[in-house]
Amino acid sequence: MSAFLKKYEGLWLFLISPAAIIAAAVAALIVFGAVFASWIALVNPYDLASFSLFDGLLPPFWQEGANSKYLLGTDDQGRDMISSILYGARLSLIIGLSALAIAAVLGVGLGLAAGYYGGRFDVVVMRIADVQLALPAILTALLIDGIARGILPQAIQQELRVMVLTLAIALSLWVNFARTARASTFVEMNKEYVQAAIMMGQRPLRVMFVHILPNILGPLLVIMTVDLASAILLEATLSFLGIGLPADSPSLGTLIRIGMQFLLSGEWWILWIPTLVLVALVVSINILGDFLRDIFNPRLR
Amino acid sequence: MLKITGLTVKFPSRFGYFTAIENVDMSIKPGEIHGLVGESGAGKSTVGAAVIGLLQSPGYVASGTLLLGETDLQALTFTQAHEIRGARISMIFQDPQTSLNPLMTIEDQLIETIQAHSDISHTAALKQAVDLLEEIGIENASQRIKAYPHQFSGGMRQRVVIALAICTDPDLIIADEPTTALDVAVQSQVLNLIQRLAKQRQIAFMLITHDIGVIAQVADRVTVMRNGRVMEAGETAQVLGAPKNLYTRALMDAVPPLDRKIDRFRVLKDDRIASSRGRMAERWLLEGQQHDLTGLSVHNLTVTFEEPRRSLFCKPPIYVALNNVTLNIKPGSIMGLVGESGSGKSTLAKVITGLVTPQSGEMRLGGAVLPVGKSRNRHHLSRQLVQMIFQDPYSSLNSRHSVGDILTEPLWFYGFIKNPVERKNMAASMLSLVGMPPDAINKYPHQFSGGQRQRIAVARALLARPRFLICDEPTSALDVSIQAEILNLLKELQATFGLTILFISHNLAVVRQMADDTAVLRNGRVEEVNTTDAVYEAPQAEYTKSLLAQTPVMPPSWRT
């Protein structure tokens, strides 16, 4: 038993932390619901035929006048809130994860190369990163959105909204990856196993990705979880402000924006329920991220 | 004065109790330098920490008594213990770099300590501090005292640490590896100072070290520890000169002598290449010797680095790491390269391997010109013929790759063996050749000790079928008994496969055991090159003479 615990000390730390367990459960629940949305959800919010205006503005089940079919009530169009949230969370997670993937590939690649080659290449990459940091994500999104509107034909613009949004979020997140990867690569470059690989005459790409990358993965994984939360929040912010997704393919942010109209009219659930789901998702991902950091950094234990 | 009886220290952990030291007895008289010697993990530092009451939490003294004079150190309250620390017991740490506060001047640090323990005025404390610095041999002390720690050299800094330790006139000083981070010249000065203080001020010293030479030179009495237990204790000459305990004897056998060359160290682990599993690798290495014996010569090599800019308006200053170095390493011989830190030893290794581009100069490997730095392309033959064994076996193996991946990489990379299964077999055979169990191949580097890792590093180098090996301080991170094993292994391999070796070390005794020829390097210049016997028996350069004179040695009569 003790040998097992020693080997999987991370698992042990996880099992004795109530916060980590709750966070994992909440995140798992939301992700599960999002992945299987088309099977679980009562109605398809994108399919106008699956819901009816007559069911509009029904309150959650504990309030008077509720329909037990719609546990958390419906919005003004008669869409089931649970279904909208599941589909919205799916879209939020897809955008968040793909933006994260693009940011990670771009950032880690550039950071590794900057740390490996150093010199002028390093200076150029890191100054670009500094400029990127000075631009708020919303500005980047507006910029890309504007360019997309300008160069893409009207017909496909709507379909490409998701991609434009993803790209905008990715562009504002890659800097974190690049900086961390570069700093860790600098440390590893001085280690003798890297010098041995260079001495052998191995290709720079192989040294970077086969030798250095596995050794700097720890901090990068931590950044990934933290940035996943930022990516989801960023998407929600952009959608809330109307730069992101349109109302007919709602993400969590769009749902919150729509809900704002009902804030003062008594139909509170249309705003509050998606907001709470978003908060729960982001907080639990952040807790899991902190937890990962503790595992990878023994000094904090 | 200090009397320890039956001291046992335990560390509770999630997996039960770990006993760091068990039943240790020791007594130190005033003015006595008591050596505490042992290899890593022996519990030497734990004894010191228990005496001064700074055991790392959650460790605690499980049983035993600690008496300083009449004071029972364990019966003290927290405040009393705090007063005794510094006033009656002081400590000197290994690294003078980190044991002084870099943001305070020496003056502030000394006066702070003096005033914390005696109620005197600032002026009186200052005078006392200046006197102290003069006593420990810092010239112009009244001026130098205003300086910050970084303005002193390593040796001077360690003197200041000693001044801090003695400024409260303690009865006992615990010195934990006080000279390990220092060059040999500075080490001998610091050791002389410790000896003088013990005699003049009647301070008792507990000298914790792994270096038997240091103990032999200064300690009156010695306690040998292993795995938390005392193996042997007594007068230094008696314990080290005529050891009774088996472990002490093995330890003494492993210490390389400075004054003669011994063929092979006597070690418990025998490394004759006899294991049948290793035969395959041995045959493979022997049949790969189409490149005969490969010597290396270096002509007028100069390497300079730019230092950080001091001002925006002038060019960064130039630091000369190697200055016109000429060396000729004969095919099939071992060239030893000795020098203090900063003498350019490792830079030379990096130039040969192509990691550093020299400013000028030429290299020849087996007669053919060896392209320097970046001009050597990735497929150049020398990348296979020249291999290197690094100092730190903890960072020279990629901790995320399995030993199998690490060892098969050269076989795959140089295209020696196409079949992955055969590659793995060859790697396993090579592991037996270097004295490792072949099942090590599925494990990861962190599952091995330093000595075992160094064997894996040797195996990796051999799997490239090298003709020229660079060993950069291959044993300085290892315990002395492990060092003896690795040196034996290297000698055995060199003799079997006719390798040419450049053996870099700061340890003169180790080089004496290994090298046919020896070059002495100082500040990037070659001071002396000759056969090893000539360099050690009849040194020509003044610098070599002083290096040899300052290296701690055991009296010849102690030969076992």
Image (tube, coloured by chain):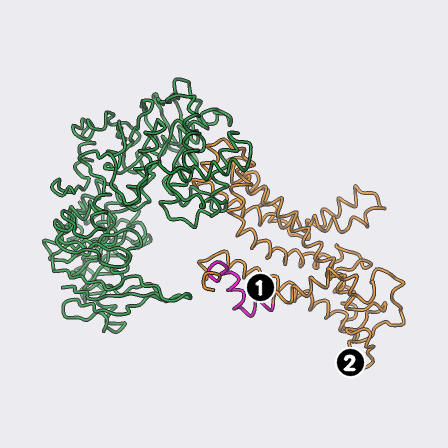
Chain colours: A orange, B green
Determine whether A239 is above or below B499 in the image.
below
Q: How many labels does the image show?
A: 2
Looking at the rendering, which quadrant does residue B208 occupy?
A: bottom left
Residue B390 in the image: state x and y as whole percent.
38, 38
Residue B198 in the image: state x and y as whole percent.
13, 54
| Circles 2 and 1 on the same chain | yes
Mark 2 surroundings: few (<14), some (14-19) or many (≥20) residues within 10 A: few
Q: Furthest residue to the top?
A: B367
Whether residue A9 appears in magenta in the rendering, the answer is: yes
Which residue type carries mark 2?
A: Gln
Q: Furthest residue to the front?
A: B276
Give the distance between the C-alpha atoms of the residues marked 2 and 1, in whole angstroms.
33 Å
Residue A74 in the image: state x and y as whole percent.
81, 71
Mark 1 surroundings: few (<14), some (14-19) or many (≥20) residues within 10 A: some
Q: Which mark is residue A287?
A: 1
Determine whether B443 is above or below A88 in the image.
above
Q: Furthest residue to the bottom?
A: A64
Q: Left or right of A68: which side holds B252? A: left
Q: Nearer the viewer, residue B281 or A231?
A: B281
Instruction: Kindly identify the residue that appears in the image at 41 percent across and 18 percent down.
Output: B368
Which residue type carries mark 1?
A: Ile
Q: Can residue B127 be seen in this view?
A: no
Instruction: Kindly identify the residue that appears in the image at 12 percent across and 60 percent down.
Output: B29
Q: Can residue A72 be seen in this view?
A: yes
Q: What stretch is highlighted in magenta?
A: A5-22
Q: Residue A63 carries which label?
A: 2
Q: Please, what secondary structure does the residue beneath circle 2 have?
A: loop
